[in-house]
Image (tube, rainbow, N blue to C red):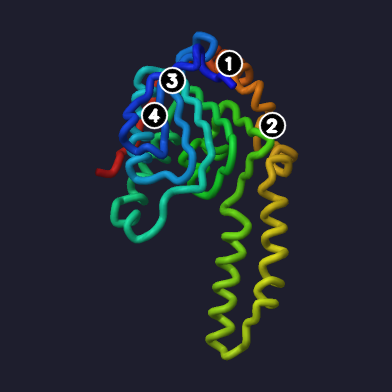
Amino acid sequence: MRIFDGSKFSEFKPLYGESLVTAFANIYGIKCGIVANNGVLFSESALKGSHFIELCCQRKIPLIFIQNITGFMVGKDAEMGGIAKNGAKMVTAVACAKVPKITLIIGGSYGAGNYGMCGRPYSPRFLFTWPNSKIAVMGGAQAAGVLAQVTRENRRRVGKPWTEEDETKLKSPIIKKFDQESDCYYATARLWDDGIIDPADTRKVLGLSLSVALKSPIEDTKFGVFRM
């Protein structure tokens, strides 16, 4: 499946923050900036994304975000490495960008990663999903695991038993609810996107969206203060 003209793109900082791909490409002759990920965002990825978005805004190049994200990296090492600060920089860049933004969700879209990759709250001109996509705060199994752990600790504190049967009974409805409500058809039925598209039509849909979005003048972008 081909998306870009000639299947070619010019990558920005290919050896840095490799979990995020940033590149310049053309779709039907229209130059655009691509911000695409596959998995978790690290500090380096967030910094690279912020820099690239700023460049595109300076040059008034529209942005296409391609999401398959589980969120920002968590844990002691990530926190010490500045993931909160650097993740906030990327979210700031996305929020401030005045160039046309188009978002395509091709897999998972979870947690704060949805914000960093220009989810619906950040007003992309268009947001499309593939039929296999999922949108949620977190996965059903992860949510059920957290709630089960909290309940187990509360029971232990007051001296009440906690069996495998209790855990299964708690987890099953949570997982079922998350699986149902994270489905892309659940989202599109509530107009949280602009439609589920056939992956084979991706190039055509993005090309038409770009041509429509560029009909109006592009405003100058004014960024807030990025923390050092």
Q: Earlier in the sequence, mark 4 or mark 1?
A: 4
Location of mark 3 (residue)? 219
Q: Is residue 106 left or right of residue 54?
A: right
Which residue corresponds to mark 2?
A: 196
Relative vertical location of residue 169 with respect to residue 78 in this rendering, above or below: below
Residue that extends furthest to the bottom in the rendered view of this protein: 159
CA distance separating discs 1 and 3: 21 Å
For label 2, count other residues whose C-alpha is less than 10 Å away and answer few (under 14), some (14-19) or many (20+): some
Please report the residue visible at 48 percent of the width from the left and 43 percent of the height from the top: 39
Give the SS element for disc 3. Answer: loop
Contact between labelled residues 2 and 3, with CB atoms less than 8 Å apart: no
Mark 4 touches mark 1? (CB < 8 Å):
no
Residue 211 position, x and y percent, is 57, 13
- Is label 2 in a helix, a strand or a loop? loop
Q: Quadrant of residue 46?
A: top left
Reading the chain from its start, which is encountered first: label 1 or label 2?
A: 2
Q: Is residue 199 left or right of residue 102?
A: right
Between discs 3 and 2, the one toward the N terminus: 2
Q: Please state which amino acid type lies under the numbered disc 2.
A: Ile
In the rendered image, the quadrant that contains the N terminus is: top right
Circle 3 crowding by C-alpha within 10 Å: few under 14, some 14–19, many from 20: few
Q: Which residue is mark 1?
A: 207
Task: Determine if residue 189 is in view.
Answer: yes
Front residue of 17/91: it is 17
**How far is disc 4 from disc 1 in space, using C-alphas?**
20 Å
Q: CA distance from mark 1 to mark 2?
A: 16 Å
Residue 149: mark: none
